[in-house]
Image (spheres, rainbow, N blue to C red):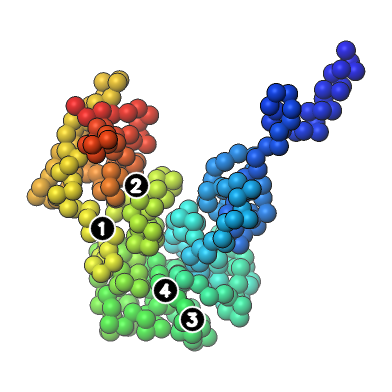
Amino acid sequence: MKGLLFTTVIILACFGNAITQNNVPVEQEIYVCPPCNRKCDDLVFNNPGICKHCNMKLMKKSELENTPKVERTKVGLYLQSGVEILDLAGPMEVFAYAGYEVITISKTKDPIYAQGILSVLPDFDLSDAPAVDILAFFGGNAVLPSKDKELIDWIKSQKEIKHHFSVCSGALILAETGILDGKQATTFRYTLDVLEQNYPKIEVLRGARYVDNGKVITTAGVSAGIDGALHLVAKLEGLEKAAETAFYMEYEWTPNKGVAYSGDSPYLHMNDVSILAEYEGSYTSDSGRTFELEMDSENKELLIKINNKQHPVFYIGKDQFLTSHASHLITFKRNAKQQIIGFETTEHKEKFDRI
């Protein structure tokens, strides 16, 4: 008996997590991260899911050789000593969760002390930083880098940038390069006067969460960087992707909370009454929970009534809405005739049927 038990243990140890069919070992499917030029490219997983390192959906290793290399949007975060932690961390998480490749850049590769608390070792310095699609700057001791001629000249030399992005007083760095000349911009509330007085070619907007000029996005201070980054993701990838990112971060996001350039605004259909009206009605679940969806034609928004209180829900794409009270997703279901028959929500683990 002991010999049989020992043999069984050896067999299990040899096959590990192998799957069997008719008592014959079958090789277990291996999953990998799609190529993203990170260390997680070399990792293997036993089950499908999301790579926790880069947030990309895992794929079967057997399919990898037929998959072209993914060219992800590359984001460069410029750091200076004293950089505000949330200025940096908020947008960094948004861009990472959206699946972008994020790198850090500083004048040297010496450790950066964010707010004198957190030590950050930059990936690159000005001499070896690769070209990026989005170049971002942050507040926290931003006056010094804004007066650093070497840095300003380096920024001007970056010709491949598709979008410049700033949070808080990081706008001062962009202002010094001339990139904001003739444009609207915002910054940290305590830096608005500095930006307006020192850079008269910039139209400074007060009270704006973020300002998008098409290729340049500036945001107000600290937490406003999250809204600006989500806006940029919505602009580049669509509202649904931005909503998924906000939901993953458990961030209570309100779309279209800033000043957006109308030419490529992702919110063009968000307040289209002709679209929203189709979703009006009463919905109930098997447990007896009932929600009312009503149109507010004056404000051009759809309201959901929960516990006798109304909250707006934001249209992000066909049959997809984002709730305002907790940033949950609502997905409407249709029948074969394309009639709306109900919805599901990430907030409640039950289905709601149209009454």
Label 1: state its secondary structure.
Answer: loop
Foreground label between 1 and 2: 1
Q: Which mark is residue 116?
A: none
Q: CA distance from mark 2 to mark 3?
A: 35 Å
Q: CA distance from mark 3 to mark 4?
A: 10 Å
Mark 1 touches mark 4? (CB < 8 Å):
no
228 relative position to 81: left or right:
left
Say whether disc 2 or disc 3 marks the residue closer to the N-terminus. 3
For residue 344, which quarter of the picture?
A: top left
237 relative position to 115: left or right:
left
As drawn, the residue found furthest toward the top would be 1
Q: Which residue is mark 1?
A: 267
Q: Which residue: 29% across, 60% down?
A: 266
Q: Mark 4: which amino acid?
A: Lys
Q: Mark 2: which amino acid?
A: Glu
Residue 232: give x, y in percent of width and height. 37, 62
Residue 230: give x, y in percent of width and height. 37, 57
Q: Which residue is mark 3?
A: 158
Q: Which residue is mark 2?
A: 252
Q: CA distance from mark 4 to mark 2?
A: 28 Å
User: Looking at this view, is 75 or 150 the one in front?
Assistant: 75
Foreground label between 2 and 3: 3
The answer to whether residue 201 of the structure is visible from this angle is yes
Q: Which residue is mark 4?
A: 162
Quick one: label 4, few (<14), some, or many (20+) residues within 10 Å?
few
Q: Which residue: 28% across, 24% down?
A: 285
